[in-house]
Image (cartoon, rainbow, N blue to C red):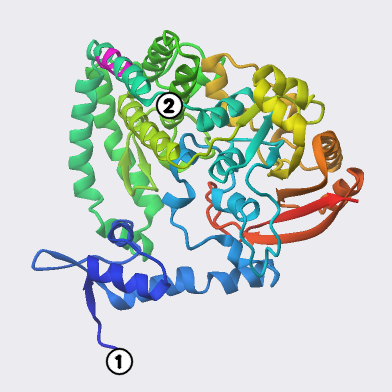
Amino acid sequence: MIEEEFLDVKQASNYASELLGKHVTTSNINYLIQYGRVKKYVERGNTLVSKIELLSYYNSYNGNRESIWKDQLGSDLNWALSFDQFKEAETTKHVHRLHPYKGKFIPQLVEYFIDQHTDEFKKEVFFKPGDIILDPFSGSGTTMVQASELGIHAIGIDISEFNAMIANSKVGKYNLYTLNHEINVITVHLKDYISDSHIIEFEEELLKKLNEFNNQYFPVPDFKYKVRNKQINEKAYGLEKENNFIGIYNELVSKYQIKLRQDYKEKFIDKWFIQNVRDEIDFVNHQIDKIEDENIRRIVRVILSRTVRSCRATTHADLATIYDPVISTYYCSKHGKICKPLFSILKWWESYSKDTLKRLYQFDGLRTKTYQYCLTGDSRTIDLFSSLKLINPDFYDIVKGKKIKGIFSSPPYVGLIDYHEQHAYAYDLFGFKRQDELEIGPLFKGQGREAKESYLKGISDVLNNALKYLTDDCDVFLVANDKYNLYPTIAEKSGMKIVNQYKRPVLNRTEKDKGAYSEIIFHLKRK
C-alpha cells in the first residue's frame, strides 16, 4: 500500500513540471483544484493536493493520449506537430488573440514550416527572409503575422471583408499613445452613458443574491469535485437550483424595470443581445465613427467586435456554437454554478481594450520591416497584382519584381463552418457586405456529392489562379482534414503533385468534442 503524500500548490507545480518535462505553473495546479480535477485538502489553512491523485490525473490525461490517439487515427500521426509542449498563452501569443476566430491554426504550425530550421521531419528550408508568401484563405491572418516575425513579406486574400479587417488590424502599425487616448475618451463617454440607467444598481443586487445562493448550493471546489466523481447528478441538481433561483431573478428584473428583449428580431444583432447591451453597443460604435485616423478606427472596431462577441445572450458553455438566446439566470456547466447573462459591455470593453494595447506593444517588438496585407476578394478570380497596386504600390513593386515563393494556408473544410455567419453580429453592426454565396465549402451547402464537387472545383480554381503569381519552384502547403480524399484530385486539377504530407493531431479545438482529431499538411509542387 502506497502511503499517501500531500503537496502544497508550489510543491505540486514542481512535481508536475518534473513529471511532464515542461513548466507547470501554480496557476495550472489551482485550475485543477478549482475545476474538480483533483481534490482540495486543507491543513492549517494551507491548500494541499494528493500526490497520488495528481499522478493519476496526469497519467490519464497526458501520459496515454498519444498512444490512444495513434490507435484511433493511425500510427502515422506525427505527434511532434501537436506542439503540446506549448501553453495556451504561447499558442495565442501577442496579436494572435486580438479577436476570436473559429477554425484558425496555431502560429507554431505556420512557423514550423516557414522558418529556417530543419529536423528529422522537415528536411529542407522552404522560405527565407525577404521571400514573399501567399495565404489565399487568410482568415484571421495567422500566416501574415508569423511571416512578419520571420522577415517574410506576406499577402492574404479573403472573401470576407470582416476577416480582412481582423487580419490587417493584427499587422497594422499604430501610434499606441493616440490609440490609448481614443479608447479612454470612449470609455469615459460609455461610463457617463451607463450612469443614466439602472443597470449598475440592478447588477450589484443580482450579483449579491447570486453569490449568496452559489456559496450555499455550489461550494468551490467541493461541488465540481463531487460532480466529476459522480457523487452528484449534475444535470438534475443544476436544473433544480436553476428553477429555485429564477423567482429571485424575475423580482429584480421587475424592480429595476429591465427590458430583456429587443422589439425587433430581423437581424442577428437584434436577437442575440439584451436591450441594454444593444444600446451600449450602438453608443460605442457611434463614438468610434468620430475617430479621424482610419487605422485607429479599424483597430478600435476590432476591440468592439471582440467585446460584442463576448456579450451575446448565450451560455458560457456555448460561446463557440450558440443555440438559443439566454435572457435569464441559468445553471452553467462550465463554471459549476448559477450564472447570469450580460447586461452591460463595460467590463469586457475595458478588459479587451487593455489587452489589445498590451498585445500590440508586444508585437511591435517582434515585427520586421516587411510588408503584409490582406486583400478582400475571391481567390479564384482576383487579379492580385492590380489589387495590390491600388492598395500599396511599394509592396506591389516588390511582388512584381520577384514573384511569390509559395503558399501556406488552411482552406475551409467541406460543410464545416459558415464563415460569414460566425461573425454575423459584426456584419450587422459595421454594415459590411456579406458574400456567403462565394464561400468555398460552407456549412449551409452540406457534405453531399454536389457540395464535394463544388469544393473540389473551388480549391482547384484558387490554386490555378494563385500559380500565375508564384515562382516556378514554388512550395505550397495546405492544411486540411481531408476525410473525403479530395486533395489528390485537387492537386491533379491544379497541375500540381503532392510531394509530401504530414499528419498532425489537433489538441485544442473550440468545439466541445475533444475526441481524437487530426489534419493533414499537404506539400504540393508544380508537376
* Image height of 123 relative to 513, above or below: below
The main secondary structure of the magenta stretch is helix
The quarter of the image holding the N terminus is: bottom left
* Image height of 305 relative to 335, above or below: above
**Front tag of 1 and 2:** 2
Marks 1/2: CA–CA distance: 56 Å
In reply to whether residue 472 is colored magenta, the answer given is no
Under mark 1, the amino acid is Met
Residue at (60, 32) in percent of width and height = 371
Mark 2 surroundings within 10 Å by alpha-carbon count, few (fewer than 14), some (14 through 19), many (20 or more)? many
Taking the image as shown, residue 168 lies to the left or right of residue 460, namely left
Query: Looking at the picture, how far across and down is residue 455, in whole percent?
Result: 81, 39
Query: Looking at the picture, how far across and down is residue 2, in whole percent?
Result: 29, 89
Taking the image as shown, residue 148 lies to the left or right of residue 476, namely left
Query: Looking at the picture, how far across and down is residue 224, in whole percent?
Result: 32, 57
Mark 1 surroundings within 10 Å by alpha-carbon count, few (fewer than 14), some (14 through 19), many (20 or more)? few
In reply to whether residue 188 is colored magenta, the answer given is yes
Residue at (20, 47) in percent of width and height = 215
**Which tag, 1 or 2, sits closer to the chain's start?**
1
Q: Nearer the viewer, residue 409 or 429?
A: 409
The boundaries of the magenta stretch are: 186-191
Numbered circle sitting on residue 303: 2
Q: Nearer the viewer, residue 343 or 476?
A: 476
The answer to whether residue 176 shows anywhere in this view is yes
In terms of secondary structure, where does tag 1 sit? Answer: loop
Q: What residue sits right under mark 1 in the picture?
A: 1
